[in-house]
Structure formats: C-alpha cells, structure tokens
Image (cartoon, helix red, strand yellow):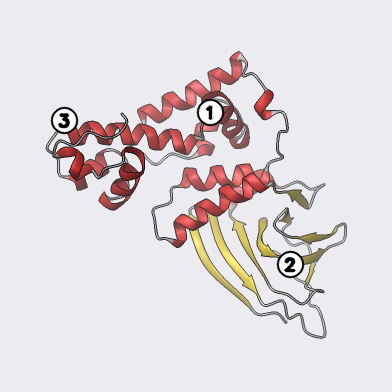
C-alpha cells in the first residue's frame, strides 16, 4: 500500500482543503477505495491512474477528478512515482459534482491561480474564504475560450455592479462568493467569470482594493492605532494590512502617516 500524508490547508464549516502526498508504492496488490462523501481531487504534481465502474483516467496537473460518495474505485501508480494532490471536501463540493463526468480539465491559468492561494497558506499569510472559493471555481469550471473577446451585456454589467455594491457595503465583513452569487441569482462560477469580464479584475482583488482605500483614509485622516485601522478596514491583523499596503502603495502605513504620500492613490 502507498504511504499517504495529509495536511489541512483550509477549513471552514462546509469546505475543507487538504494537501495529500503519496509515495506511489502500490505494492503487489491494489486495494479498492471508497470516498465517504463528495470530493474533488486536484493534482498539484505527479500523476496517478484512476478507475471505477465507468471511468479510467490518468489524473495529473491538467486533469481534475470528481470522486462520488460510496463509489468503489481503484487508484494506482503504474509509473512508480509519487504525487501530491489537493483534496477538496464538504457540502460546498456538491454543486460541482457531475454524475456523467468523473474528470474535468484544469487550465494552466486556473492552476497558477490556485497555486498562488496555496503559496499564501505556506507563507502563513491570512487567506480568506472568498479567495479559496474563487480559485476553486476557476479551476473546476470549464474555460471560456471567447472570454477576452466577449463584450459584457446589460445583465452581466448588472451582476457585476450588484456584487461590487455589496463588497463596498460589506468590505469589513467575511463574505463568500457563494453568498454574493446567490444574491444576484447566478452560480458562483458565473459570478466569478462575469465580474472579471466586466470589472477587469477578480472579486477578491476588487475587495482588497476597496479595503486598502479605506485603510489609506484611516491612516491619513485619523489617529487610530494601526492595529485598529487593520480591523476597521477588514484585514485580519496589522501585519496583513502592512504587507498589502506596501504592495499597493509602496510604503508602510506608518511611513505614510508620517507625511510620505503613497506612490499612487
């Protein structure tokens, strides 16, 4: 049997992500596996062979896997190498399950977006639910080849505007893509795609920009301690604010408050 090691990456009430590494040593006999609940498996590196009653596929960085609950399957490593995967579990996963398709394509762009979120986790930087949801939506949902050529219509502008309005009102709260999408009557994936198409940026990037503008105002126009500025503007802590502020404005909040204006405002 191959040796597995799992480490929790992100955990919320209905969504859990774990990085699972496998040494790829199958042994003389393969053992059938059976997922307890719905699960998405995204290969981070390496590959393995998956087989159940209806599907036989090689899962790697360009191919993701939907594992159905209580469905016997067999996972093997005929090439002998190990792999690392991201296991996504919880009720949130159900919206992405497809009884007719066990595998799905993962674009290089979506893979890089997901890895950027995982890199933040590895650096012990705060990662918000909206970032995780957005990365997963872009990874699991099919790509739209005509996305860049498409001109947003009135309904799409309405959807993006409603999401932006909600983010402006609730910038200091913990919001989810699923809730934002539900408010405008669309799926989480559609909300992500439409918002990026209309606004030219992701939902999380827009949320971050709104928070940074509020933080800048509090830094320059109040004498609140920077730790309080961070919380008022929706950041997890002062360190989180400082890193984001430096990337955006080129100076720390403290230096900015002392009279040094940021490079761009």
Tell which residue pokes out farthest to the top in this image: 154
**SS label for mark 1:** loop
What numbered label is drawn on residue 34? Answer: 2
Instruction: Please give left or right for residue 250 compared with residue 35 in the image.
Output: left
Q: Nearer the viewer, mark 3 or mark 2?
A: 3
Quarter of the image with the C terminus is top left
Q: Is label 2 in a helix, a strand or a loop?
A: loop
Give the residue displayed 55% in from the left and 18% down from the top: 157
* Inter-mark Cα distance, 3 to 1: 30 Å
Using a 10 Å C-alpha cutoff, classify the residue at mark 3 as few (fewer than 14 neighbours), some (14 to 19) or many (20 or more): few
**In the structure shown, which secondary structural element does the residue marked by tag 3 occupy?**
helix
Task: Give above or below for 45 relative to 96.
Answer: below
Figure disc tally: 3
Marks 2 and 1: in contact by CB < 8 Å?
A: no
Mark positioned earlier in the residue sequence (1 or 2): 2
Q: Please state which of the two labelled residues, at mark 1 or mark 2, is closer to the viewer.
A: 1
Residue 176 at x, y = what percent? Answer: 48, 40
Q: Quadrant of residue 44?
A: bottom right
Q: Earlier in the sequence, mark 3 or mark 1?
A: 1
| Disc 2 crowd, CA 10 A, few/some/many (<14, 14-19, 20+) | some
Residue receiving disc 3: 221
Q: Earlier in the sequence, mark 3 or mark 2?
A: 2
Marks 3 and 2, Cα distance to the nearest angstrom?
58 Å
Tag 3 and tag 2, C-beta contact below 8 Å: no
Classed neighbour count for the residue bearing mark 1: other residues with Cα under 10 Å, few (<14), some (14–19), many (≥20):
few
Q: Quadrant of residue 224?
A: top left
- What is the spatial separation of the Cα atoms under label 1 and label 2, in whole angstroms? 42 Å
Residue at 65%, 80% (x, y): give it.
3
> Residue 75: which disc?
none
Tag on residue 200?
1
Where residue 148 sits in the image (x, y, percent)? 65, 28
Locate residue 118 relative to residue 101 in the image: left or right.
Answer: left
């Amino acid at each position: 049997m191959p040796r597995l090691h799992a480490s929790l990456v992100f955990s919320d009430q209905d969504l859990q992500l774990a990085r699972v590494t496998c040494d790829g040593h199958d042994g003389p006999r393969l053992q059938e596996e059976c997922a307890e609940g719905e699960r998405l498996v995204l290969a981070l590196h390496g590959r393995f062979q998956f087989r159940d009653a209806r599907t036989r596929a090689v899962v790697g960085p360009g191919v993701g896997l939907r594992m159905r609950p209580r469905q016997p399957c067999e996972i093997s490593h005929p090439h002998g190498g190990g792999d690392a995967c991201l296991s996504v579990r919880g009720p949130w996963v159900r919206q992405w399950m497809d009884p007719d398709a066990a595998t799905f394509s993962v674009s290089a762009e979506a893979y890089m977006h997901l890895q950027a979120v995982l890199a933040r986790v590895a650096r012990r930087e705060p990662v918000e639910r909206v970032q995780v949801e957005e990365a997963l939506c872009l990874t699991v949902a099919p790509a739209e080849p005509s996305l860049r050529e498409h001109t947003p219509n009135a309904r799409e502008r309405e959807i993006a505007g409603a999401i932006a309005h909600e983010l402006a009102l609730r910038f200091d709260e913990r919001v989810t893509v699923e809730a934002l999408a539900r408010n405008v009557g669309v799926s989480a994936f559609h909300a992500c795609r439409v918002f990026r198409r209309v606004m030219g940026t992701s939902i999380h990037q827009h949320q971050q920009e709104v928070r940074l503008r509020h933080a800048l105002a509090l830094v320059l126009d109040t004498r609140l301690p920077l730790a309080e500025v961070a919380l008022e503007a929706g950041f997890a802590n002062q360190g989180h604010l400082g890193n984001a502020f430096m990337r955006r404005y080129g100076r720390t909040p403290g230096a900015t408050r002392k009279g040094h204006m940021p490079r761009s405002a």
